[in-house]
Amino acid sequence: MGIKERVEQHPIIYLLMSAVSVSIIVLSVAEYFCRQRIDIASQKSELRISTLESELTSIRRGMGESNFLDIRTFVYPKDRLALLKVNPKSKFVSEENFYAILDLPGWQYERTSTEKLIRTETGEELPPTAKKVLGKNPVNRWTAAESLAVKGPHGFSESGPDIIVEKVLYTSAVPSNKEDYSKFLKEMTGSEPRPEDLPDRAFLEHLYRGDMATVLLANFFQTFLGEFVESSEISTQLLELEKIANVIYLQDLITVHNATVNGKKLPVYFVRHELIIITDQNGVTFIVITVPSADPMPRGPAYAQIQEWFSGLAIPVG
């Protein structure tokens, strides 16, 4: 089975492998985007300033009691690490330098790798160079006790509810030499680039330290959201999309007709994804949340548990 077919059958799983790596292919069209700075007049009242700041740093999720998720509650500058007020239930994951509730009630936590995750979810092995570049990268995964496996037309396959957190360092996302880089692109695209088209490692790392979140978002649209456009049985609806500084939030809803859920055939079923991309000078952190449900509305125990999980999340960046 070719890489294109694998991606089409397992879009969100392959996001973890290719979101950074595929972006290498489109570096020629990447640009640096200016970050907006909003000056709040000093004469505003303290209450008004607090309200504005909260609105400007909040993501509209459309879930839970407040419908918003303030990024200041889980993304912190590294120099404030000693001042964090972390949820007492959270534990420190030293390898990726973040806090999270590992023993979330009703969920099973495991620490795996990109290579093992792909193998478990798809039954496929990463191509050799991709395995060398990203295969050993650690992945943190929470899976609900009541797991749902959703199958659909055109090889569609998703499972959940689950939460995945993965941090990819820019230095590990770039092949160590041009020979590996050429092999990597050939494995991912099926075509071999010309030597003169290969940028050097220093250029790639420099570009990664720009506004990489925007480049990754563009690749997400190109690779994943458009894959079911021609299908009358599977449709993808973009529900939310926001970019606040170095954080991008995306929420979509996939409607699957003629689905099979845990072996039972159903006329229609839904899969909701949340994708959060957090970039800093050293790497990019992905948070991928998948919730299959018979209800297109974001309600039920899984969403309440995910909200609890967010209450214990703290990611220092710098």
Image: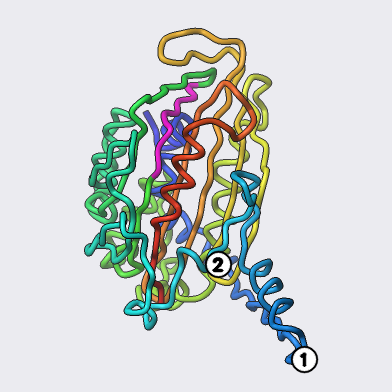
Residue 172's spot in the image, x, y percent? 29, 64
Side of 255 where 116 appears, left or right: left
Count neighbours of disc 1 (C-alpha within 10 A) and say few if under 14, some if 14 to 19, many if 20 or more: few
Element marked by disc 1: loop
Q: Please give the residue where the numbered disc 2 appears in the rendered image.
A: 28
Residue at image point 55% right, 67% down: 28
Count neighbours of disc 2 (C-alpha within 10 A) and say few if under 14, some if 14 to 19, many if 20 or more: few
Residue 221's spot in the image, x, y percent? 60, 48
Magenta-highlighted residues: 155-163
- Image quarter of the N terminus: top left
Q: In this view, does 102 lie above or below 270?
A: below
Q: In this view, does 145 lie above or below 252?
A: above
Amino acid type, mark 2 = Ser
Q: Please give the residue where the numbered disc 1 appears in the rendered image.
A: 43
Main secondary-structure element of the magenta-colored stretch: strand
Q: Distance between the residues labelled 2 and 1?
A: 45 Å
Amino acid type, mark 1 = Gln
